Every structure is written in structure tokens, then in C-alpha cells.
């Protein structure tokens, strides 16, 4: 087994062993199934991971299901990315979403998320090989948005989560491993203005909020050992404006603020009330205090369209060094022709040898 495969195997086992901690540490690295936090589409990923107030295609199932209320027509959207490409560990991520519009009801959407964690070698206590096994995580769900008024919509979604990290029955330090399962619910709202004029050019403003993955803790070992889902609160705004009176050139600016609403040892509703103060996380042989201000993740981006045919995008994402330490620039582009569309995004990390360095996402869609 290569060094990298040993590393991935250790990570997988460590995810199970998280359930053995009785501390009140929260946020970074403690919640289970972190694949639910991976941004699923190339468009928003290229805009600094911001999209809660944009949410104008089928990937609103992730960003803000209330956005479905403002959509018509049918769409299928597929995103693929090789995950942690610089590690060369054969991990990949896929997200399939689709919406179907029904007159008098609105747009109903479904989605499937799949993270392939690759193939690992299983060994006994003496290092003897016991064969290989594959690890993966998957979630599938539906979402719906409903207009309260012409400008305000509410949305919700539900997903079933299945996490297969190691073969069921594997002994991990006296604990018997099992597949993890849970259910997550999303609650969302989106406000979008009617078009208005700025310097004789049409503009719109949107504001959105989404509480995602609210649900029971996931269990990998015995009943007493459970980990929280990555419940995330995301709020943000978006401003879209035509750059000329013809409307051929448009620009959108978006900005998201997000926070993980999870606490180890707490149920989902208890964590909602107890995630607004300072928490302590492990750091070497001690702990580090992380104040609320350092728990907020910030994403901002910009998108330029020419005649709804060609797009250029850029963005910036920031997370405190005490709470994940992700900081990177994002870039991307998109093409639309008839009913078809393609997008791609690229992550340029500001830290050398960062796991997310050189991550590329590719998306393809059909709108009909």
C-alpha cells in the first residue's frame, strides 16, 4: 500500500473515531459527511463559492431551494470534478440535479450527490493484507420553492444520506463499524426585486438565506457515539445590472456569508442555539479558542455575460486560519448555445501545497 493510500485509510478511520470524543468541540473538522458542503456547480464555484442569492438554475437544490420558485422550464445539470487532484488519490465528486416545471405548482427539483473516496487496502494488526475495499458517500433528495408574493419565495428540501467509509463489521479500536445514514432538511427564503433602473440601465437586487442539512446525527459505531451533520447557515446578496441600454452586456456581483451550525455531542436543534459563541478546537496537545467572528466563511464573486452566450467569472473565498484556513481565488467561464450549456471553474489557492490547489470543476446542462 502506498503512502498516500495509507493516508486516506487513516483519514477514513479517523472519521469513525470522531464519534469517540466526548468533548464539546465544534465546527472545523468535527461534523460528519463533509462532502455535503462541497459546492456542486462550476458557475457558483467560479464566483468564490457564492450563490445563495443567485440560485437561478437547478443547483438551487444546494444553494437555495427558494430560488426554484422563480424558475420555469425544465433543466438537467451535471457537475464532475476530480477531488484533491494534487494528492493523486483517485477521488472524484459528481452532482446531478434537475428541475421540472408544472403549471400551477411550480418547479420541483431532484438531486444526487456522489463522492468516490477510492479504493483502500485493508490490513490486520500485523500489517497483513486482508484485501481491498471501496469507500464512497452519496446523498439524494428533492426540493421545492413556493412564491408567497411576486418577489418573495420560501423553499425547502430533504435528502437521504448514506456514508460507506469502511466495510460494515470492521473492528476499529474495539468499536464495530457500520454504514452511516441520516436525513437532512433545508429551509430557505429568497427575495428578488422587480427590475429597476440605474443610470438608464436595468438592474435587480436579491437577498437569500438557507439553513441546510438540519437533521439527526449520523452513527458509525454504537448508539452512544454519533456525529452531527454539517448543518450550514448561509446568507447573502446579489446585484445584477446591464452594462448598456441594449442589455447585451450584464454583470452580476454576489456575496455569501456562511457558518457551520454544529456542535459535537449536541443534537441539531440544540446546536442551533449554541453555535453563536466562542468554541474550542484541538490544536496539538492543547486547544485554541475560535471566536464567532472567525467562524464566518466569506465568498464573493463576479460574473459577466455577453448576450447570454458567453460568461467570464472570478471570485474570492476566505476562511479564518483558526477555522479551516481555506483562502483562494476562483476563475471560470461558461458557454450557452440553444438548449445546451457548459461551465468550468478553477481554484487558485493562496497557500502552497493546499489540498484544494488546482481543483477543476466541469458542468454541463440541458435546458428545455
Image (cartoon, rainbow, N blue to C red):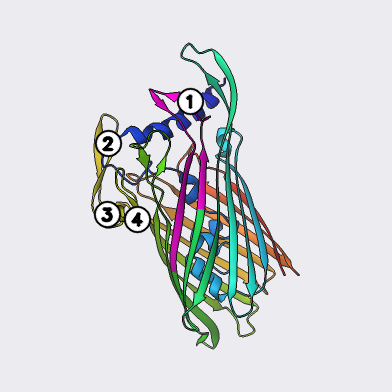
Q: Quadrant of the N terminus?
A: top right
Decide if residue 58 is in sight here. no
The magenta stretch spans residue 319:
no
> Of the numbered discs in the image, which one, if any, rests on residue 170?
1
Q: Nearer the viewer, residue 31 or 288?
A: 31
Quarter of the image where one finds residue 366: bottom right
* Residue that numbered label 3 is attached to: 292
The magenta stretch spans residue 171:
yes
Which element is circle 4 on? loop
Give the label, 3 or 1, closer to the camera. 1
> Of the numbered discs in the image, which one, if any, rests on residue 296?
4
* Residue that numbered label 2 is attached to: 22
Decide if residue 146 is in sight here. yes
Which element is circle 1 on? loop
Q: Residue at x 51, y 41 (%)?
A: 163
Magenta stretch, residue numbers: 160-188
Counting residues from the start of the chain, the first of labels 1 and 2 encountered is 2
Instruction: Say whether marks 3 and 4 touch (CB < 8 Å).
Output: yes
Which element is circle 3 on? helix
Q: Residue furthest right?
A: 338
Instruction: Say whether marks 4 and 2 touch (CB < 8 Å).
Output: no
Q: CA distance from mark 3 to mark 2?
A: 22 Å
Q: CA distance from mark 1 to mark 2?
A: 22 Å
The picture places residue 129, in percent across and down from the top left corner, at 56, 15
Q: Is residue 134 left or right of residue 199?
A: right
Amino acid at each position: 500500500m502506498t503512502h498516500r493510500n495509507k493516508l486516506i485509510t487513516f483519514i477514513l478511520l479517523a472519521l469513525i473515531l470522531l464519534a469517540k470524543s466526548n468533548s464539546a468541540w465544534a465546527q472545523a473538522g468535527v461534523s460528519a459527511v463533509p462532502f455535503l458542503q462541497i459546492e456542486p456547480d462550476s458557475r457558483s464555484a467560479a464566483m468564490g463559492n457564492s450563490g445563495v442569492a443567485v440560485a437561478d438554475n437547478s443547483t438551487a437544490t444546494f444553494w437555495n431551494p427558494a430560488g426554484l420558485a422563480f424558475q420555469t422550464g425544465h433543466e438537467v445539470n451535471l457537475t464532475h470534478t476530480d477531488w484533491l487532484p494534487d494528492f493523486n488519490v483517485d477521488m472524484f465528486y459528481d452532482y446531478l440535479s434537475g428541475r421540472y416545471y408544472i403549471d400551477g405548482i411550480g418547479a420541483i427539483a431532484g438531486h444526487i450527490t456522489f463522492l468516490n473516496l477510492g479504493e483502500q487496502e485493508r490490513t490486520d494488526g500485523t500489517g497483513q493484507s486482508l484485501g481491498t475495499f471501496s469507500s464512497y458517500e452519496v446523498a439524494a433528495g428533492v426540493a421545492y420553492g413556493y412564491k408567497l408574493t411576486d418577489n418573495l419565495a420560501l423553499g425547502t428540501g430533504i435528502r437521504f444520506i448514506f456514508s460507506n467509509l469502511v466495510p460494515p463489521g470492521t473492528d476499529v479500536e474495539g468499536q464495530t463499524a457500520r454504514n452511516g445514514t441520516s436525513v437532512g432538511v433545508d429551509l430557505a427564503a429568497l427575495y428578488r426585486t422587480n427590475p429597476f433602473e440605474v443610470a438608464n440601465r436595468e438592474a435587480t437586487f436579491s437577498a437569500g438565506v438557507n439553513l441546510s442539512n438540519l437533521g439527526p446525527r449520523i452513527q458509525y459505531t454504537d448508539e452512544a457515539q454519533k456525529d452531527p451533520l454539517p448543518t450550514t447557515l448561509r446568507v447573502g446578496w446579489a446585484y445584477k445590472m446591464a452594462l448598456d441600454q441594449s442589455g447585451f452586456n450584464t454583470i452580476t456581483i454576489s456575496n455569501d456569508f456562511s457558518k457551520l451550525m454544529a456542535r459535537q455531542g449536541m443534537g441539531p436543534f440544540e446546536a442551533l442555539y449554541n453555535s453563536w459563541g466562542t468554541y474550542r478546537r484541538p490544536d496539538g496537545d492543547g486547544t485554541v479558542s475560535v471566536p464567532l467572528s472567525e467562524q464566518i466563511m466569506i465568498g464573493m464573486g463576479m460574473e459577466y455575460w455577453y448576450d447570454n452566450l458567453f460568461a467570464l467569472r472570478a471570485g474570492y473565498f476566505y476562511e479564518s486560519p483558526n477555522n479551516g484556513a481555506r483562502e483562494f481565488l476562483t476563475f471560470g467561464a461558461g458557454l450557452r448555445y440553444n438548449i445546451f450549456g457548459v461551465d468550468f471553474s478553477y481554484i487558485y489557492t493562496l497557500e502552497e501545497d493546499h489540498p484544494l490547489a488546482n481543483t477543476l470543476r466541469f458542468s454541463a446542462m440541458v435546458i428545455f
